[in-house]
Image (cartoon, rainbow, N blue to C red):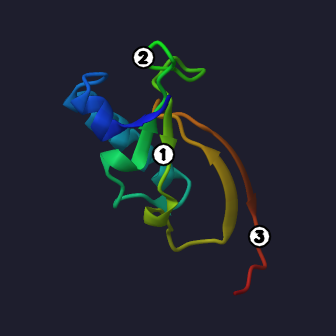
């Protein structure tokens, strides 16, 4: 059952340093693909926890973190792109991206 990072810290699933590290990694991953997540806070991200209370890991062995508040994520200025991004906290992520060279608004 997922729980937000702030609650996971309060409940003792992770410590404050891990919470801040996971939050920072998600923000960095977003920036790498052209999105600004600077307004995200710990309660905007979910930590995947199984039914036994254990943290679930992604394919890289890092804690699985799920972005749950897209209102605070903004496209940064630049070439028009559409992207589907899976953002684990590990610093690496899978992405499908296409560039629209003749984009007009």
Of circles 3 and 2, which is in front?
2
> Residue 43, position in %: x, y?
34, 47
Disc 3 target residue: 100
Q: Residue at x 28, y 40 (%)?
A: 6
Q: Is the residue marked by circle 3 packed among few (<14), some (14-19), or many (20+) residues within 10 Å? A: few
> Residue 67, position in %: x, y?
50, 47
Q: Can you say whether 26 is above or below 55 in the image?
A: below
> Residue 20, position in %: x, y?
27, 38
Residue 29 circle label: 1
Q: Residue at x 51, y 40 (%)?
A: 66
Quick one: label 1 or label 3, which is nearer the N terminus?
1
Q: Residue at x 53, y 33 (%)?
A: 92
Disc 2 target residue: 53
Distance between mark 1 and mark 3 Cα atoms: 21 Å
Distance between mark 3 and mark 2 Cα atoms: 43 Å
Which quadrant does the C terminus fall into?
A: bottom right
Direction from residue 50 to residue 13 in the image, left or right: left
- 79 or 17: nearer the viewer: 17
Quick one: label 3 or label 2, which is nearer the N terminus?
2
SS type, badge 3: loop
Q: Can you say whether 34 is above or below 10 in the image?
A: below
Q: Are marks 3 and 2 in contact (CB under 8 Å)?
A: no
Q: Can you say whether 101 is above or below 95 in the image?
A: below
Distance between mark 1 and mark 2 Cα atoms: 26 Å
Q: Residue at x 66, y 71 (%)?
A: 80
Direction from residue 77 to residue 18 in the image, left or right: left
> Residue 65, position in %: x, y?
47, 35
Quick one: label 1 or label 2, which is nearer the N terminus?
1
Of circles 1 and 3, which is in front?
1
């Amino acid at each position: 059952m997922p729980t937000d990072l702030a609650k996971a810290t309060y409940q003792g699933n992770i410590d404050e340093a891990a919470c801040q590290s996971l939050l920072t990694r998600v923000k960095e991953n977003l920036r790498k693909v052209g999105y600004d997540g600077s307004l995200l806070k710990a309660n905007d991200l979910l930590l995947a926890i199984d039914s036994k209370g254990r943290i679930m890991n992604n394919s890289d062995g890092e804690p699985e973190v799920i972005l749950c508040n897209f209102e605070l994520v903004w496209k940064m200025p630049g070439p028009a792109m559409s992207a589907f991004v899976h953002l684990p906290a590990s610093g690496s992520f899978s992405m499908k991206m296409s560039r629209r060279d003749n984009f007009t608004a």
